[in-house]
Image (cartoon, coloured by chain):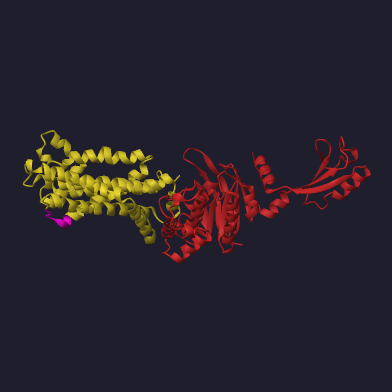
Chain colours: A yellow, B red
């Protein structure tokens, strides 16, 4: 294991993040906080509680999840796409480093950024809404697991993409709608049939539900199923990455 | 001399069906400067990319210092530095950061003193805190060399190191490469500038259409294939080559003012003395003479033409 190399990639990526602080921290924190201000502090008091949780507090886990999914995906995707775009990937490919170590460096950095962002947003949220965390350990576990899983997913997108547009398509056109319709702003139990059943096919429902359970002990689906779904997606991403490096898909001629 | 790189029956056909390399066999000796010479699209970059692990070969084996490049990739790649043809850099990073990153990526512990030495040797020290995007093309090329040297490689690949570089910088680059060789580094460079190979290389390999058509010691190559020409400026123009001189390989310049005699430097007798005697007898005097040796360029053009 070439730990020096993994550390070099990790430090390089974190440094890139530091260089673009405004875009990479301020912007997601601000845009997520606007929801707390509007739905939590401003009109939240006019909306009735959901399962005994004030509305402003109810939406926090879903919003953190939304940010976590989009940021992890686009960060990791950009991280590996950029060297492909500029041509500097030659250096990664010619270095004494295994594909697994390359992925570890990029995915590790992207996941770290998302977790830090998530914690900042939670801290910000607590200023506007009454936040309560029933199971902090599980909360952190879901946070980490989701950040890692979607950073792996982003890494795959970054290798698959052949233009900047494709990098944006997945977070904007797939993840964001699925998160909005996956119970960020409502409990899916409030939906009439057949929409309730249809929603269960949205994988993000399970992520949000499990994450929300770690805060308020309320969930749309069983926590065990949430965990199992997250782990299956993680495994799926790992298998795809293993395949990518085995075949050299889009990286090695 | 030991072969530090040994290429056996390597071929490459890209997914598009393009055959970039037919069967290539080549040994690179330790501490030599080897120039891979060929026109654009001949397969130079493909061959280098295969050795460096960027492109997978379709068939064949390569060993570096006796180790298989695929099985022992960690040991092998740690020994190799690559300067690519394209100026691909992390443009937003500083020179210092990008060179230090390269060292780490190749698994070497941080060593600011060494990085400083590399930057000083390449006249980059003053630019260490500059972002790469602010540097000129020549400076970027130096940054790429610094990155390739950051992990103290024993073998350095330079893919078209002086493409698009001005004359002065090209001379600097040659100095740098010679300095590296003197410090014990084996250098393999590709170029389509023949003067570059002529200036620097110990051995030359000519590649065209994916085939290595010739590998030879440069001096030997030039001696063997080199033809010399003797140009005689005549005192009085003549209208045709006299019958008495018909047996010589002579060419009359347009206007009849000069005779060009082509001879083989390898032959025991060049025929110059006999020619001059016969000319005197035929009453043809000359006022000046010059000899001209064919350059690597002439040899190269001949070779490539023959192979087509």
Left or right of residue B268: residue A32: left
Foreground pick, B141 / A30: A30
Please identify the quarter of the rendering in which residue B178 is found.
bottom right
x, y percent for residue B177 = 57, 57
x, y percent for residue A108 = 31, 54
User: Split into 4 quadrants, where in the image is the N terminus of chain B?
Assistant: bottom right
Foreground pick, B201 / A225: B201
The extreme top residue here reads A194
Q: Is residue A90 visible?
A: no
Left or right of residue B56: residue A168: left
Magenta-tinted stretch: A132-138
Q: Is residue B157 visible?
A: yes
x, y percent for residue B79 = 49, 60
Any magenta on residue A195? no
x, y percent for residue A52 = 6, 47
Foreground pick, A230 / A79: A79
């Amino acid at each position: 294991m070439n730990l020096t190399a993994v550390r070099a990639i990790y430090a390089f990526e974190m440094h890139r993040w530091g260089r673009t602080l405004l875009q990479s921290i301020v912007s997601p924190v601000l845009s997520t906080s606007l929801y707390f201000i509007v739905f939590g502090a401003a009109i939240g008091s006019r909306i009735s509680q959901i399962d005994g949780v004030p509305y402003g507090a109810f939406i926090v886990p879903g919003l953190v999840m939304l940010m976590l999914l989009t940021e992890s995906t686009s960060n990791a995707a950009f991280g590996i796409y950029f060297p492909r775009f500029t041509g500097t990937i030659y250096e990664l490919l010619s270095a004494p480093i295994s594909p697994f170590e390359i992925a570890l460096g990029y995915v590790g950095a992207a996941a770290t950024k998302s977790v830090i962002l998530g914690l900042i947003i939670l801290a910000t949220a607590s200023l506007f809404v009454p936040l309560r965390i029933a199971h902090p350990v599980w909360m952190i576990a879901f946070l980490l697991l989701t950040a890692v899983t979607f950073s792996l997913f982003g890494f795959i997108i970054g290798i698959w993409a052949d233009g900047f547009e494709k990098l944006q398509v997945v977070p904007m056109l797939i993840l964001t709608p699925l998160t909005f319709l996956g119970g960020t702003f409502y409990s899916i139990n409030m939906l009439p049939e057949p929409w309730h059943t249809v929603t269960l096919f949205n994988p993000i429902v399970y992520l949000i539900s499990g994450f929300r359970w770690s805060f308020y002990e309320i969930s749309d689906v069983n926590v065990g199923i949430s965990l199992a779904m997250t782990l299956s997606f993680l495994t799926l991403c790992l298998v795809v990455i293993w395949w990518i490096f085995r075949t050299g898909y889009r990286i090695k001629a | 001399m030991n072969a530090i790189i040994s290429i056996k029956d390597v071929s490459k056909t890209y997914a598009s069906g393009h055959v970039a390399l037919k069967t290539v066999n080549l040994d690179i000796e330790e501490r030599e400067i080897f120039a891979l010479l060929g026109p654009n699209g001949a397969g130079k970059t493909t061959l280098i990319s295969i050795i460096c692990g960027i492109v997978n070969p379709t068939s064949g084996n390569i060993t570096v210092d006796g180790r298989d490049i695929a099985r022992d990739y960690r040991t092998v790649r740690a020994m190799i530095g690559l300067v690519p043809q394209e100026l691909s850099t992390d443009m937003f990073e500083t020179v210092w950061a990008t060179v230090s990153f390269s060292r780490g990526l190749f698994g070497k512990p941080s060593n600011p003193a060494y990085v400083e030495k590399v930057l000083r040797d390449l006249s980059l020290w003053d630019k260490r805190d500059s972002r790469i995007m602010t540097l000129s093309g020549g400076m970027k090329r130096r940054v790429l060399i610094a990155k390739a040297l950051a992990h103290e490689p024993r073998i350095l690949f330079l893919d078209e190191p002086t493409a698009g570089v001005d004359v002065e910088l090209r001379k600097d680059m040659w100095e740098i490469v010679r300095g590296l060789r003197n410090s014990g580094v084996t250098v393999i460079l590709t170029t389509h500038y023949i003067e570059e190979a002529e200036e620097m290389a110990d051995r030359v390999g000519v590649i065209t259409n994916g085939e290595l058509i010739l590998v030879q010691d440069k001096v030997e190559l030039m001696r063997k294939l080199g033809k010399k020409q003797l140009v005689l400026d005549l005192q009085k123009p003549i209208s045709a080559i006299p019958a008495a001189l018909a047996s010589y390989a002579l060419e009359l310049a347009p206007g009849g003012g000069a005779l060009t005699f082509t001879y083989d430097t390898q032959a025991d007798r060049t025929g110059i003395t006999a020619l001059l005697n016969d000319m005197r007898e035929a009453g043809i005097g000359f006022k000046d003479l010059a000899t001209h040796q064919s350059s690597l360029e002439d040899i190269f053009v001949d070779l490539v033409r023959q192979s087509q």
